[in-house]
Amino acid sequence: MTEEKSAQPAIAAEAPVNDAEIAVQGGAETNGEAPVETIVLTLSCPNTIGIVHAVTGFLVSHKCNISSSQQFDDEMTDRFFLRIQARCEKPITLSALQAAFKATAEAYDMEYTLVDADRPMNVLLMVSRFDHCLNDLLYRLRMGQLNINVPAIVSNWPDLKPIADAAGIPYIHIPVTKDTKPEAEAQLQKVIEDNDVELVVLARYMQVLSNEMTTKLAGKAINIHHSFLPGFKGAKPYHQAYDRGVKLVGATAHYVTADLDEGPIIEQQVFRVDHTHQPEDLVAAGRDAEAQALSRAVRWHSENRVMLNGHRTVVLQG
């Protein structure tokens, strides 16, 4: 008789962790790293038995108290997605948790991130001449609605510098022409590296990034565009939409890819309109939709709620 194999990955049972092993006495730092207070763990892996048990068991053994949890089982791709936020009840560094979690992650073939929930994400904003998305993001940042840090605003035009100055954020003007695009992107790359940028937001930045740049920014750049593409292309899509008598206007926030405006969708916002709305009304509604969709996409990404699932996204909202 042969022994029946379990579908559950083999993983050694975690021994109880001695407080002395993880404690940072008196709140002192360990190797220069301060203890982490709140963590966010996001992961995706092939679906199988025991994933939640293994993850929650790991957190319990390291004295982490779960404050929120969301999960999704995609039956189409047979992948499992999980986001957990937890408070660390005993002092421990983020590095120690990350190192300890590797065994569990490897046992279940997980793609994961384990981060400090309280640390703001470094986000670079890029704009051209339209200011509505920039103003909305800066307002939400000022109101404490976005847990991000904006080290700089980059633009191919000087027009919006007064907005950056009012917010106390450096404004970097990088002109772009057909002949100078490689040099401009080299400057942009330096800004990204010098500021440890984790996310680039194209807040109505009206330049197409090169394939090389989009590859470098894969999964780390968000764009916003009106949802009329590809049906209404060109400089005045809302006027084209008016001529066709559309009943909905909207916007799509998506990750940037080499395929223009075809990256994985994070969020969409629509407003209903009718025959009484003039082209200017559609433009106004469209700008509202763009600002709302983009701000939500930035917030969800910065809170580690968005995970790629092929060409789609999974957004685990609280």
Image (spheres, rainbow, N blue to C red):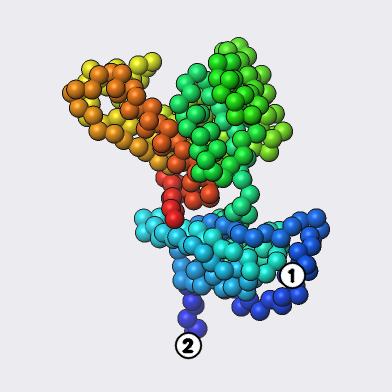
The residue that label 2 is drawn on is 1
Q: Residue at x 48, y 46 (%)?
A: 300
137 left or right, relative to 273:
right
| C-alpha span from label 2 to label 1 | 49 Å
Q: Which mark is residue 267?
A: none
Instruction: Specify whether residue 73 is in view.
Output: yes
Front-most of 220 and 121?
121
Quadrant of the rendered image containing residue 194? top right
Q: Quadrant of the C terminus?
A: bottom left
83 left or right, relative to 190:
left
Which percent across, then down, holds residue 40? 57, 57
Q: Earlier in the sequence, mark 2 or mark 1?
A: 2
Kindly identify the amino acid type of the residue bearing the numbered disc 2: Met
Identify whether 98 is placed above or below 154: below
Identify whether 148 is placed above or below 286: below
Q: Residue at x 25, y 19 (%)?
A: 278
| Secondary-structure class at tag 1 | loop
153 left or right, relative to 301:
right
Residue reaching furthest to the right: 31
State how many labels appear.
Answer: 2
Which percent across, then down, holds residue 90? 67, 69
Report crowding for label 1: few under 14, some 14 to 19, many 20 or more residues within 10 A (C-alpha).
some
Front-most of 158 and 233?
158
The residue that label 1 is drawn on is 23
Which percent across, then down, holds residue 231? 30, 25
| Secondary-structure class at tag 2 | loop
Q: Residue at x 35, y 27 (%)?
A: 286
Identify whether 147 is placed above or below 248: below
